[in-house]
Each structure stands twice: as structure tokens, then as C-alpha cells.
Amino acid sequence: MNQGQIRIAVFISGGGTNLQALIDASKAGKLSAEISLVVSSNQNAFGLTRAENAEIPTFVFREKKYESKSEASQDLLEKLKEHKIDYIALAGYLRLLSSELVSTYNGKIINMHPALLPKYGGQGMYGRHVHEAVLASGDKETGLTFHIVDEAYDHGRIIEQFNLPVLENDTPESLQERVLIKEHEEYPKILGKFIRGEYDNN
């Protein structure tokens, strides 16, 4: 693992393919940062296996097991502090971050959304649901959006967008696959620029 000074936590909820892209980029020296912790909202997420295979510490964070949201938030912050986390990258994380976490890591949390925000964002708009909505709308173009995270779903300041055509014979699966390939290609690059402060993160 790259032993650079910048330490990143990647938050996931599922398969973790973007996590894998970030791990691979870090190992190859294409991302000047170390993936130091993987946080998952789902104890069965395959992304946890990816992290374990790469010998990255993991933390399953399930708010419902705590007595209060405040207690949950404090435990997560303690875990991030313990691992000396500098930046957070959301990679298919399906939970809203607490105001305490957003405040503590203000301007240091990035998310990738598989559509051209502000369209097709918000609660419930993730994975296949996004691509179904794009196709149902008849839009001729889709893409992906990188944004700084605030306290609302898919709402923070947009820092990069990439456009992809919607093809006449596209299905949700084919569209998702093309967008995913672009995600894997771009996320390590954008994250690298983000941690270098090239987007004026505040």
C-alpha cells in the first residue's frame, strides 16, 4: 500500500467496485494517498472482502445498533480519528452523513453520483434506480458527477461532471455498465485532484 501522508477512508454499502479502483490506483502509485479504512453500512457488503484482501482495516457502521444518532456519530468520528483519516471518499454509500461528521470533515468529503446532478439525485436515487429514471425520461445524455458532500443527499457543490450518450438500445444494465467503467477510470484522478486542493474544497 502507498505510504503517503494523506490517509483516506472509503465509505461503501455494496460491491465496492469503485473502492477497488481506488485501492488499485493507490497501490500503483497513481493516487498519492493511502486507503487507511473502509467503512460499510452493510455487514454483508462484498466491498468489505475487497478491503480485507488488500489488508485494509474495516468498520461496519450501523446507526440502529446505537442508542442515539449522536452516540453513533461520535463512535464513527472516534474510529476515523483512531485511523488518522484526512479525507473521506463515498463510493456507493447509501446513508446520509451526520451533521457532526460533515462539520468535522468540512470540505474533505467527496461523493460520486452516477448521473448528471442536479437531475436524478436525492434519497432513493442510487444504482439501477438512477439509470431506470434516465431511460424513462427519454434523455439523450447521462454521465457522472463528483461533488463535495454536505448534509443533504447529492446536494453539495459540483466539482466535475462527465457526459455519456444514452444509446437507442440501452437497458438499465447496459447504461449502468458504461457509466461504471467511466467511474472507475475517473474516480482515482478526481480524488487525487481533490486532496491536492485543486477544487478549492471549501
Image (cartoon, rainbow, N blue to C red):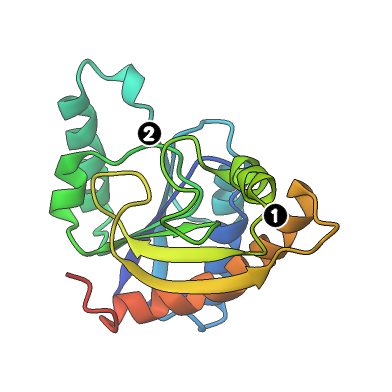
Q: Horizontally, is 199 left or right of 15 in the view? A: left
Q: Horizontally, is 50 left or right of 3 in the view? A: right
Residue 151 in picture, x, y percent from top left: 23, 45
Residue 161 in picture, x, y percent from top left: 47, 72
Give neighbour class at mark 1: few <14, some 14-19, many 20+ (Cα, 10 Å).
many
Q: Secondary structure at mark 2?
A: loop
Residue 124 in picture, x, y percent from top left: 49, 35
Q: Is residue 22 above or below residue 61?
A: below
- Quadrant of the rendered structure where residue 142 is? bottom right
The residue carrying mark 1 is: 176
Residue 140 versus residue 73: which sits nearer the camera? 140
Q: Residue at x 50, y 61 (%)?
A: 116
Q: Secondary structure at mark 1?
A: helix
Q: Report the amino acid beneath label 2.
A: Phe
> Quick check: can you spot residue 119?
yes
Q: Report the amino acid beneath label 1.
A: Gln
Q: How many marks?
A: 2
Mark closer to the observer (2, 1): 1
Disc sitting over residue 33 in the figure: none
Q: Is residue 98 above or below residue 70?
A: below
Q: Residue at x 27, y 19 (%)?
A: 66
Q: Residue at x 58, y 31 (%)?
A: 44
Q: Horizontally, is 101 left or right of 127 in the view? A: left
- The answer to whether marks 2 and 1 mark residues whose Cβ atoms lie closer than 8 Å is no
The residue carrying mark 2 is: 61
Residue 34 versus residue 123: which sits nearer the camera? 123
